[in-house]
Image: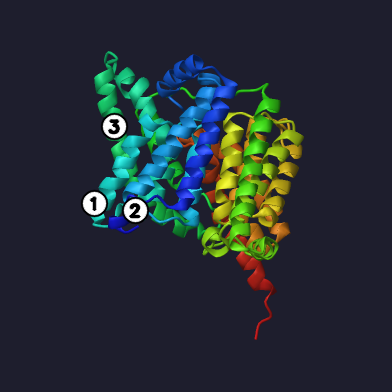
Amino acid sequence: MDRKNKHFLYPEYRIFLATCIVFVAAAFVFDRPQGIINGLGRIFVSRGLLLTDYMVVGGIGAAIINSTLVGVYSVLLLYWSGAKPTGATIMSLWMAVGWTYWGANVLSIIPLTCGVWLYAQLKKRPFADFAVVAILGETIAPIVSVFFFSNPVMLHLGIEWHLSLNIIMGIFAGLICGFLLPAIASAAARMHDGYTLYNIGVTGGMIALFLAGLFKAFGVSVPTEMIWHSGDNLRIAIFLYVLFAVLIFIGLRLGWADKTNHIKKFKDMCSQTGHAPNDFYQGYGDSSYINMGLLGIIGTTVALVLGGDLNGATFACIFSMVAFGTLGKHVYNVLPLMLGGIICAFLNTQEVNAPTNILAILFSTCLAPIAGQFGWGWGMVAGFLHVVMVIHVGPLTNGFNLYNNGFASGFVAFFLVPVIMALKREKTPQG
């Protein structure tokens, strides 16, 4: 964005802000103003460790408003940095509003954003180059909140709880972790070669893994949480289906104005593997909104059919599918992964609709490039292995990494893709 035109907000960002108005209206359908205000207070002082469902902590209305606040904050960040709309920036906005239903809020995100900004200053590069990383850095927001509101280090040392000291330590931890994010993200992308779309999940997992290991080595205990909302499937399903119908309408409406052939564009989009370069928004424009809406409908329907709960956690899963509808996911490369995950859920020791199974099935779609590149068979294998890996990897990060499924997917991609490549080479006739 040219600095002289910085007062102008790109249409894509205005569309997102208009959607945020829908969120706010929905929040007041779910709860009264006083209940929302009180609920936001409880959310802001929550540790937010995985898994903390803000629909339980603050109520559905407050959870929606918290999500909207982070969405608006993210738009302002893109506006301030001058970042132009791409599949990645639009994706980051939808990830921001999805993932703040559990574990992240504006207070815990700001120190991480500042850490990324410091990295950009050190490298003498525009902050716009790292704006998406800064937004997705919410993945490790619980690290900041834990220091703010429980400070396990001070408890371990037997030092009396002091809010000012906790806030200083939380800000310092956020600055360090935010500073590390861009550098590690670059290395993580090379590790999995783009075969998982959740690169910041891998990055956040690495940071969380080392922090959890450091705490454990010195005997610092951080009790994990399992706060899970249930019993509101009907109301939440109506909200989600209406929202995704609005997204489809937006895509169709914008396309009509531009005389877009959506059928052709959608077919072309679904012929893409999802592996980089995978910017669907720049390649297919308004049709990507239709793709986003369809992915949201698929995710919501799968969760309901399997008997899962619609809550803050499944919001994050479904919104991550929607978000990457602009950057690598489409109907044909997510279905085999979900099918493989469902098969694993029926075979493993947990109930099919257990939280870990439901979340892992929906999040397995981050491996869409594997299904797109190597076909349905390998896609099902990747989905199956993803559910297995999530069950094992979860405890390693002590709840510090919200994109824990993204972390697990990095291992699946790192393990499975070389195997696929080797087998394909074996089948190649030797000259």
Residue positioned 46% across, 46% down in the render = 14
Spatial CA span between label 3 and label 1: 18 Å
Residue positioned 50% across, 15% down in the render = 35
Res 347 quadrant in image: top right
Q: Nearer the viewer, mark 2 or mark 3?
A: 2
Residue linked to disc 2 = 82
Callout 3 secondary element: helix
Residue type, numbered disc 3: Ile
Residue in the foreground of this view, choosing between 341 and 251: 251
**Left or right position of 65 against 26:** left
- Are circles 2 and 3 on residues that touch, CB within 8 Å? no
Mark 3 closeness class: few <14, some 14–19, many ≥20 residues within 10 Å: many
Q: Quadrant of the C terminus?
A: bottom right
**Left or right position of 14 against 176:** right
Residue in the foreground of this view, choosing between 382 and 92: 92
**Rendered location of residue 244, percent (x, y):** 64, 42
In this view of the protein, can residue 166 be seen by the observer?
Answer: yes
Q: Nearer the viewer, mark 2 or mark 1?
A: 2
Say which label, 2 or 3, has the lower sequence index: 2
Residue linked to disc 3 = 171
Residue positioned 62% across, 37% down in the render = 359
Res 2 quadrant in image: bottom left
Considering only vertical position in the picture, is 62 above or below 78?
above
Residue type, numbered disc 2: Gly
Residue linked to disc 1 = 121
Considering only vertical position in the picture, is 76 above or below 307?
below
Say which label, 2 or 1, has the lower sequence index: 2
Spatial CA span between label 2 and label 3: 25 Å
**Left or right position of 260 against 404:** right
In this view of the protein, can residue 399 be seen by the observer?
Answer: no
